[in-house]
Amino acid sequence: MVFHPVELLFAWETWKNRPREREESGAGVLERWIPTLGQLPLVPPNGAPPELAIVLTTSARPAAAARLLADLYVALERAQLTERSALLVLHDDCGRDYARARRAAEGLSPQLLWLDARMRFGKPDFWKMHQTALLVARAWQPRLCLYLQDDVEFEPDMLIRALGLWQATERDLLRRVLYLYSSSDDEQNGRWVSFARRDAGACRLTNWFDLQAFMVDRAFFELLDHRMVPIHPNRWKRIPSQSSGVGRQFTRRLFGRAHVYQAWPPLVVHGSAPSTMNPEARRARSLDNRPDYVPSNGRSAA
């Protein structure tokens, strides 16, 4: 198999975690957004770093986004983090009515930045949405950051439980990520990397994670230098059903440099909504963890 030079460069930059500075992964990516709520250029929220920043990526699911933001409001109240939080919403869908979701976002956090895409990113440019989040993190400098996709669900105590797991792993100075999704069919020997997962008491050490829901610290962003390695469209020429490549990139760039823990049982539910980005891959693997989810009331979500 013959690889294009940009694919080889991508592989080298990813494994070495040495992303080169490029216009497409710099501040120019912000020009693809309209600041519907909040403003650009980026400034620290209220002049000080937030205790918790939340990044929500959403596309073609206005009702789900509104529901998630309403649930997030309750979770922040339960964790007593409302006044110490900041919210970034990356909305990649120009044709749907997100008015109800925007109203839900406005009352959620003292610092809000809602960005509407000028044109749809789609799967090939999904990495640029995450590049945007990295740029915002560089400006805001949050102590912790929670990433959520719009098709997850959770209970009101999700943040409390997640912060408890974060604290339970604090003795590991290499811990950079807590992955809140898990399922019984997760690979025992790693996804995108070879690593036999280990039981870590309250959770498990996997050293890989995907994008449904995860928590990171400030050192995560510093380790990545607040830059994505651009993913070339060649990735989808041979296999159009391949995923966005973002979770794979994060995992490989952190591997050997940081530790990733996974909540088990899961803290979020995923699988009730069809994929808007990669339906072919979802048919091959459902990523439905509802049978594995055990809410705090003890009743199965399945």
Image (cartoon, rainbow, N blue to C red):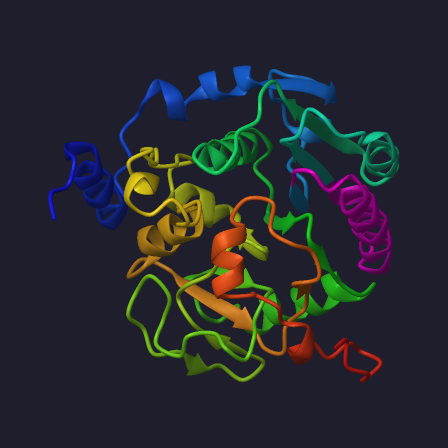
Considering the whole magenta stretch, tell me its main secondary structure.
helix
Q: Please identify the quarter of the rendering in which residue 163 is found.
A: bottom right
Front residue of 38 and 185: 185
Residue farthest along the left direction in this orientation = 2
Q: Measured from the top left, where is residue 297 in percent x and y?
A: 84, 81
- Asked if the magenta segment contains residue 3, the reply would be no
Residue positioned 49% across, 69% down in the render:
261
14 with respect to 2 (left or right)? right
Q: Measured from the top left, where is residue 121 in percent x and y?
A: 53, 29
Front residue of 68 and 123: 123
Q: Measured from the top left, where is residue 145 in percent x and y?
A: 60, 48
51 with respect to 97 (left or right)? left
83 with respect to 13 (left or right)? right
* Residue stretch in magenta: 58-85
Q: Quadrant of the C terminus?
A: bottom right
Front residue of 277 and 19: 277
Residue positioned 38% across, 42% down in the render:
224
Q: Please identify the quarter of the rendering in which residue 172 is found.
A: bottom left
How many numbered marks, from 0 up? Answer: 0
Residue positioned 31% across, 33% down in the render:
232
Where 133 sits versus 33, above or below?
below
Q: Measured from the top left, where is residue 188 in percent x and y?
A: 40, 79
- Asked if the magenta segment contains residue 76, the reply would be yes
96 with respect to 145 (left or right)? right
Residue positioned 41% across, 81% down in the render:
198
Front residue of 260 and 166: 260
Q: Please identify the quarter of the rendering in which residue 233 is found.
A: top left
